[in-house]
Every structure is written in structure tokens, then in C-alpha cells.
Image: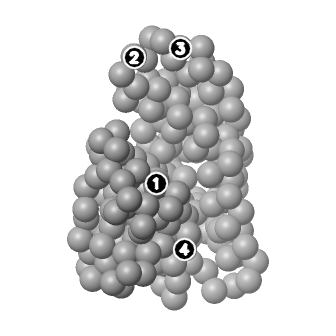
Amino acid sequence: MFKVYGMSTSGNCHKVRMVLEALKLPYAWNEIDTRSGTTRTPEFLAKNPNGKLPLLEIDSGVYLAESNAIIFYLAEGTPLLPNARLERAQVLQWLFFEQYSHEPYIAVARFLRRFHPDPGSQRALTDSKMDGGYRALAVMEQQLERGPFFVGERYTIADIALYAYTHVADEGGFDLNRFLCVRSWLARVEAQPGHVSMR
């Protein structure tokens, strides 16, 4: 049985839960609030020197960090990760896009508006994230005009990675009504077997 160290309000952690549930893999969830300092303790840093969540314990003393590395590992050999060389690379393309062009804007704006102890003091920083977030959503919209999912006309971990923070983007102040294809895609993801929402 896998053990997951995660925080339920984190989209990066939620990706891992989505894959585990979609594949019906047995796991134990170990809830950690990063604001408590637990991930900076010597005990946790021995598991993940970067001190971040999520963290997957594969076996006793065997750990894997970084959300997209974890979901790639879990999806290997399943329908959530294509076998074809180009499609696998396209999945990676969207995983990299999610971490570099999507998450730094949409997830950060969400955190600052919803979870920061003094959101008003962060208004300028939050506002600075909006253009980047809308650019990412526009890229997604353009891709989804061509097909129902991000890679190969089928549901993959590329969709799961992008869903995690997109489906709560409104909490960061983003208006998803501007993106009809993204909204339709969210509904298709939510119709998948084993789907779980962070809300």
C-alpha cells in the first residue's frame, strides 16, 4: 500500500489523489498542514530534503517527491499514460507547462487570495499573477478547441495535472466563463470514473 504525505487543499497533492482514485490503487493519506512547520522538521527532511508536499512512500524508506513525477510513476503501464513515444512526450510537455506556465500564476493567486493570513497586503502580488494565469488558460483553450483532452483524444495524467488547479481557479479570481472549451473539459474530467474534487 502506498502512503501519501499531502495537504488536501493543495492542487499538487490533489493530483496524486486523483490518480490513485482513478486507478483504484490502495493508499493511506497522511494529512499534513505545511503551515505547521512539519515539513521542515528533521524527520520529514530525511524523507524529502526539499521539505515539500506531496511525497509518496512507495516502500519502507523509498520516497518519491514532486507531484508530476509521482503521477507519472503511478500511471506507468496504465491507460492514463500512453505507450506511443510522441504521445508520452506530449504528456510530459503538458506536465512541464503546468508547472512552469500555469501553477506559478493560478495556484499562487489562489493561495494569496484564499489562504494568506492577510490577503489585502498581498494584493499587488496577486494582481501581478493574473495576466500569466489568463495566458495559461488561453493556451489551454486553444488546445481544447482541437480535441476533448490534451493528448491523443483521451484522458491522461496531462488532464489530471492541469485539472487540479484549474477547477479551483475562481478561488484565485480567474473568470472561467471566458473559456468555454476549458469549462467543457472540466466537466469531462469530472465525469471520469473515480473522479474526486478538491471541493
Where does the image place residue 143, in percent across and percent down from the top left?
69, 52
Q: Nearer the viewer, mark 2 or mark 3?
A: 2
Q: Nearer the viewer, mark 4 or mark 1?
A: 1
**Residue at the image point whose x is 62% and y is 51% from the top:** 99
**Residue at the image point whose x is 43% and y is 61% from the top:** 45
Q: Are marks 2 and 3 in contact (CB under 8 Å)?
A: no
Q: Which residue is mark 1?
A: 52
Q: Is residue 144 left or right of residue 5?
A: right
Q: Earlier in the sequence, mark 1 or mark 2?
A: 1
Q: Is residue 29 left or right of residue 123?
A: left
Quarter of the image with the C terminus is top left
**Residue at the image point whose x is 65% and y is 21% from the top:** 128
Q: Earlier in the sequence, mark 4 or mark 3?
A: 4
Q: Amino acid at mark 2?
A: Asp
Q: Are marks 4 and 3 in contact (CB under 8 Å)?
A: no
Task: Name the secondary structure under disc 4.
Answer: helix
Where does the image place residue 17, in percent across and percent down from the top left?
35, 63
Residue lying at the far top of the rendered structure: 120
Q: Which residue is mark 4?
A: 72
Q: Earlier in the sequence, mark 4 or mark 2?
A: 4
| Location of residue 26 (image quadrant) | bottom left
Q: Is residue 83 left or right of residue 55?
A: right
Where does the image place residue 31, in percent across and percent down from the top left?
25, 55
Q: Amino acid at mark 4?
A: Phe
In the image, residue 74 above or below residue 193: below
Q: Which residue is mark 2?
A: 118
Quarter of the image with the N terminus is bottom left
